[in-house]
Amino acid sequence: MRSDFKIFIQSFFLLLFSVVVGSSVLAQGIRGKVVSSEGELLPYASVYIRNLGDGVPTNQDGRYEYKLDPGVYDVLIQFLGYKSQLKTVEVGEEWVDMDFEMEPQVYTLSEVEVRAGQEDPALTIMRKAISKAKFHRLQLQQYSMTVYLKGTGQLTDAPFFLKKTLEKEGLKLNEAYTSESVSRITFTQPNKVEEKVISIRTNGDNQSTSPAPYIQTSFYQEKINDIISPLSRSAFTYYRFTYEGSFFDQEVMVNKIKVTPRSRGERVFEGYIYIIEDLWAIHSLNLKTSLLGFDIQATQQYAPVAENVWMPLTHTYRFGGKFFGFEGEFKYLASTREYEVTLNPDLAYVPEIIDEKVQEVTEDVADFKKTESALEQLAKEQPTTRKEYRKLINEYEKEALKEREEPEVISESYYSIDSLAKKRALSYWDSIRPVPLTEEEIEGYRRDDSLAVIEAAKVSEVDSVAKKARRKYKPLDFMNGASYSFGKGVSIGFKQNWTKISFNTVEGFKFGMGMFYRKYQEEKLADSVNRIRKSFNIEPELRYGISSNRFYGKVDFRWSTTKPLSGTTFGIEGGRYIYQFNGGEPINEQVNAFYSLLFRQNYMKLYEQDFVRAYWAHRVNYEFTYRANLSYAERGELFNHSNYSWYNKEGRTYTTNRPENVEVNEMAFADHELLKFNTSISWRPGVKYGIRNGRKYPITNRSPLINFNYTKALGGLLNSETAADFDHLEIGVEHFFEFGVSGKLDFNVSAGTFLSNKQVYFQDYQHFGGNRTIFSNFGPASNYRFMDYYKYSTNTSYVSGIFHYQFRKFLLTQLPMLRFSGVRENLFFNYLKTENSPSYWEAGYSLDNLFRIFRLEMGAGFENGNYLRGGVRFGIATFIQVN
């Protein structure tokens, strides 16, 4: 079996994905090659059979094969930049060899050729095309297509010190790895995609470079895989368009438009798009872009599949890039054919579009009327301006969505794989493959087939051994984490415990151990897709400090029930344990140990408590969740027991375990009792849903998260003068706004007050996410960068705001080289004001996506406008989501 290292390299640099249905085995058809007039092979040219409304592309070597029943056919050959050719051929009982020699396309300039002071004709062409974009998305009620997808990838470079290791593993540089798949894809309005994979032949896994986001989306949409489409409503904000001539093809006039980004770099296209005159639909396109430093080239050739309906026939994609010394390139070909279309009867009439910026608007031109239904207005055979037509189509789409049974569901996808998909014989592939393999691809398959035989034998041997016994205990399982199954959903095991080894001044060197018992069961619902999942968990946790010579332990009993959209969790937890004063744990214990041992700085402040807590949480749906818990605790102050450090420079001493604060008094750290009730509500108004294989999931990017939190310390119920007694209310909002691809604003704002603060101990103060280390927390708007951990903690009123704005183009990213590498620039501004503290604010600048995974921040904090401190922070790139 290949090593994990080799599998990792392949799964990063090789494809693949799937697509196209098999046709019957035929013994005749047409075949040949397509070359330019200079003899240059033309890869991925479109070979289109007009009689059938179907076609195939040529392969990388410009060769094609098309199996056909006997008969007479009109064969149309298309290739971007060359004149189309149409030939008639009669197919009998044998193969017919047909070679094509393509002449360069000759473009004629319109009579409205650009002159001084005149507008470029491309602008009115694109304005009309943009106004019709949504029409072209909605004009098909449903369509099905067979998609054949072939990907060929290779590793072209690797770090010099790993090249020999790769060769030993059988992975050679500049050696092709190929994958193929055939699927039947059905799209139904408004956004339902069903894919049935008929066959797969692959030697790699699906990759982040897969062209699936481009094949299953449309350039008529606003974005394609987060890249602004040239037909987006905001296209003129991002692009310049230049008219480069026109030509006739298949009895339509086609305009060649050059697409130039106003600011080159990531998430914008550049290249050419070809627009059909009067229909204002895409004829073909050749565009390139970049994403996270990887170059992407996309080419599509369209063909008519119904009257006034053009759909992609051939897609080709090229990806290339470098990552930590590894470099690869990938070539993908998607052939979409055997279209079955159902037209939208509401959009049967195609009006004349008037560009009001350059054309005269006469009295017979229709205006959009809010008092009339959009459907009635669409039936009127009157010309309309592009602006009014766009309003009309938008209103029609809104009306159609409102009539749906589940308007909150905005996308559906269904994916299935035929049971024989991975078992098809070579003869099957030879019969259905629309594009002949190249010699390089054939050799790659031979190599991988021989390796697969060896690996299958090894896998079989390992599986047979594994079946003889269930997992047994291994020496380091208690540290690495492990689970031991006892059948019927019952398992016990260890959590990963290496991170529970650390150092702090209260305990000295500290060790911990987490374990679990779990009983799990699933019940299928009537729809046979969704399930109810129930579990019961017991999770004990222990810790011991060498210097303090104290054991601590707690145990959590938890019951959970999870339904497709809702869920309930309740439990009881108790024991004697140590916690940070800030329950949000602003400093990681390994980071604190690092600073303590290397720099003699102990930022983590701890207290202990004997406690019992009962809790309840109910997710009504993904829009609304409420929680409640009741706890009783006896809490006490802790003191430093260790002065150990590897840094012993004179003058540097550890601070006490009592946090410094601007408003605290001596009594705030006294031993005390607590009886506390807490309830909270999380609300995401307007959340939308998607459906994947029958299961609903939330789409929350348009919905802010609003949190309400109320805490009541019931001191009056305890017969104790030291019992905590207060009321605390808080509201917070977290969300983000994207401004096209130009920028993104993340924010986290909260405000709160203590309605009463008769007796508030420091553990129950409102704490804020401070940071005094060089490490920045995950998330762009999750915490302050330079603020003390506890200096501004309060038992009064407060307001807090964390703001983070990411630019596509700012200072350094004015350089295209940096934009193409995926680097982003950010500005952040954070503010905090409490009733008794000075105003604190901080501002800074950061470089994001450095080497595609890191973030470097620089900034400073100020108190009442006076400089307090500043520095540098290192973190993980903001696009990486970590919970």
Image (cartoon, rainbow, N blue to C red):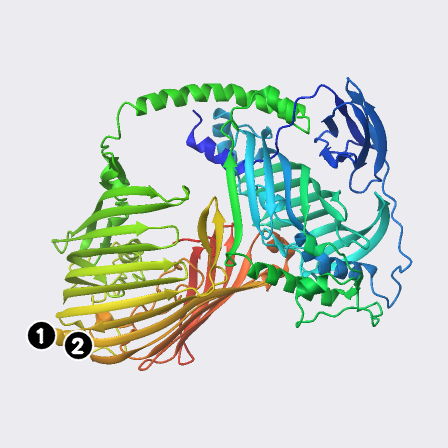
User: At x 41% / y 53%, what residue is drawn?
Assistant: 882
Q: Position of residue 90 (x, y in %)?
A: 83, 24
Quadrant of the frame with the C terminus: bottom left
Left or right, 205 with reference to 79? left
Left or right, 437 with reference to 587? right
In this rendering, the answer to whether 743 lies above or below 854 is below
* Amino acid type assigned to the residue bearing label 1 in the image: Ser
Q: Are marks 2 and 1 in contact (CB under 8 Å)?
A: no
Quadrant of the frame with the N terminus: top left
**Gap in angstroms between the C-alphas marked 2 and 1:** 18 Å
Q: Are there few (<14), some (14-19), or many (20+) residues within 10 Å of tag 1?
A: few
Q: Of circles 2 and 1, which is in front?
A: 1
For marks 2 and 1, the one nearer the N-term is 2
User: At x 68% / y 39%, what residue is drawn?
Assistant: 339
The one nearer the camera, 811 or 414, is 414
Quadrant of the image occupied by residue 638: bottom left
The one nearer the camera, 623 or 733, is 623
Q: Which residue is mark 1?
A: 720
The one nearer the camera, 435 or 767, is 435
Judged from the image, the secondary structure of the residue bearing numbered disc 2 is helix
Q: Position of residue 731 (x, y in %)?
A: 36, 72
Looking at the image, the residue that sits furthest to the right is 111
Q: Position of residue 636 (x, y in %)?
A: 14, 66
Left or right, 507 with reference to 562? left
User: At x 64% / y 44%, what residue is drawn?
Assistant: 143
Q: Position of residue 325 (x, y in %)?
A: 53, 40
Left or right, 113 with reference to 354? right
Q: Which residue is mark 2?
A: 666
In this rendering, the answer to whether 449 lies above or below 616 is above
Q: Are there few (<14), some (14-19), or many (20+) residues within 10 Å of tag 2?
A: few
* Amino acid type assigned to the residue bearing label 2 in the image: Glu
